[in-house]
Image (cartoon, helix red, strand yellow):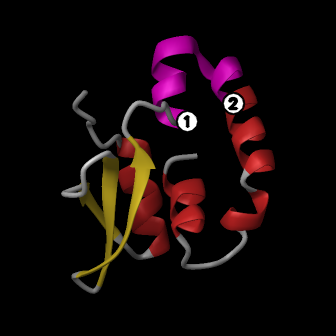
């Protein structure tokens, strides 16, 4: 499966002061860079994310999946700079 970085993710990255590229790490969607230094590889290939759910199943379904994801991963998302933080903010 080939992942395409969405405009949603690119916009979020810009707001957070990072850039994103397709991951060079097997099984991951995106590499996150700050000042041209890779800081994280996020998003498992094979799992959907917020913009993908919007496209495939609609806004209401995506919003419910986002809520569930953020509840499940709340501890990781709250640790600024962690892979969970980047995934929660760039993909969800």
Q: Position of residue 8 (x, y in %)?
A: 44, 44
Q: Which residues are magenta?
A: 50-62
Question: At 63% from the left edge and 22% from the top edge, which residue is drawn?
Answer: 59
Using a 10 Å C-alpha cutoff, classify the residue at mark 1 as few (fewer than 14 neighbours), some (14 to 19) or many (20 or more).
many
Q: Position of residue 72 (x, y in %)?
A: 77, 47
Which residue in the protein does label 1 denote?
50
Residue 46, relative to residue 26: is it above or below? above
Using a 10 Å C-alpha cutoff, classify the residue at mark 2 as few (fewer than 14 neighbours), some (14 to 19) or many (20 or more).
some
Question: At 46% from the left edge and 20% from the top edge, which residue is drawn?
Answer: 55
Confirm or deny contact between disc 2 and disc 1 (CB under 8 A): yes
Q: Position of residue 18 (x, y in %)?
A: 37, 73
Q: Quadrant of residue 13?
A: bottom left
Magenta span includes 53: yes
Q: Quadrant of residue 2?
A: top left
How would you classify the magenta stretch by its main secondary structure?
Answer: helix
What is the secondary structure assignment of the residue under circle 2? helix
Q: Quadrant of residue 36?
A: bottom left
Which residue in the protein does label 2 denote?
65
Residue 83, relative to residue 89: is it above or below? below
Mark on residue 13?
none
Q: Earlier in the sequence, mark 2 or mark 1?
A: 1
Magenta span includes 39: no
Question: At 58% from the left edge and 15% from the top edge, which residue is drawn?
Answer: 58
């Amino acid at each position: 499966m080939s992942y395409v970085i969405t405009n949603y993710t690119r916009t979020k990255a810009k707001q957070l002061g990072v850039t994103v590229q397709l991951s060079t790490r097997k099984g991951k969607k995106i590499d996150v860079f700050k000042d041209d230094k890779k800081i994280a590889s996020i998003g498992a290939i094979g799992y959907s994310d917020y913009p993908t759910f919007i496209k495939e199943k609609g806004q209401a379904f995506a919003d419910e999946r986002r809520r569930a994801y953020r509840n499940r991963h709340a501890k990781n998302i709250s640790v600024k700079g962690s892979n969970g933080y980047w995934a929660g903010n760039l993909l969800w």
